[in-house]
């Protein structure tokens, strides 16, 4: 059963807006854009939402910087590359400055991350050089779709294949 009715009794009731926003924030970090969008979708007044979000930010209950760092860390741990992470962060309403700040603060070794993803997905398979062109393209596409640049894809595959050659006796 939905705890919140479709349309609020008073769309400009800031107490109800804050209650809903805090409820959402208690589950996970949200960007300001996400919170605003969810609250507007519930039928709350836009101006009242803006005032409530300002209060929440002043109290440090909502922070785009904290959300960006958390989201970045989560996506890196899931094995996504910089292109995809940037795109998703932008879709979450983060500014280019907020995105750059997170990338500059904690940039992992993207080639190593791509290599790890490649090895997990294609562990103990035929050497890349011996594959059919169609299969080679499929493997490159796999990493590209996860958000790695072409340079990172080629470096990761090359490093993974070099590691496999060393491991074979």
Image: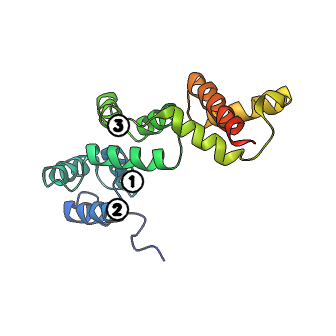
Whether 23 is drawn above or below 72: the answer is below
Q: Which mark is residue 24?
A: 2
Residue of label 3:
94
Q: Residue at x 17, y 48 (%)?
A: 54
The location of residue 11, given as percent across then percent down, is: 29, 58
The one nearer the camera, 64 or 14, is: 64
**Which numbered disc, 3 or 2, marks the residue that appears first in the sequence?**
2
User: Which residue is more in the foreground, 96 or 103?
Assistant: 103
Q: Is residue 11 above or below residue 117?
A: below
Q: Taking the image as drawn, is residue 138 in sight?
A: yes
Give the secondary structure at mark 1. Answer: helix
Mark 1 in CB contact with mark 2 (< 8 angstroms):
yes
Q: Where residue 24 appears, x then y in whole percent?
A: 34, 62
Q: Position of residue 128 (x, y in %)?
A: 76, 31
- Mark on residue 109? none
Q: Quadrant of the C terminus?
A: top right
Numbered circles on residues, count = 3
């Amino acid at each position: 059963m939905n705890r919140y009715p479709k349309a609020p009794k008073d769309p400009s009731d800031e107490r109800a807006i804050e209650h809903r926003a805090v409820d959402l924030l208690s589950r996970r970090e949200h960007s300001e854009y996400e919170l605003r969008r969810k609250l507007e979708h519930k039928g709350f007044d836009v101006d009242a939402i803006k005032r409530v979000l300002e209060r929440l930010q002043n109290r440090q209950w909502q922070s785009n910087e904290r959300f960006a760092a958390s989201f970045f860390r989560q996506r890196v741990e899931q094995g996504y590359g910089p292109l995809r992470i940037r795109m998703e962060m932008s879709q979450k309403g983060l500014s280019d400055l907020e995105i750059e700040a997170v990338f500059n603060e904690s940039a992992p070794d993207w080639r190593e991350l791509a290599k790890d993803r490649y090895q997990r997905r294609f562990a103990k398979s035929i050497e890349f050089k011996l594959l059919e062109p169609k299969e080679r393209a499929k493997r490159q596409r796999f990493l590209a779709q996860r958000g790695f640049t072409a340079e990172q894809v080629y470096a990761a595959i090359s490093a993974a294949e070099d590691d496999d050659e060393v491991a074979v006796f």
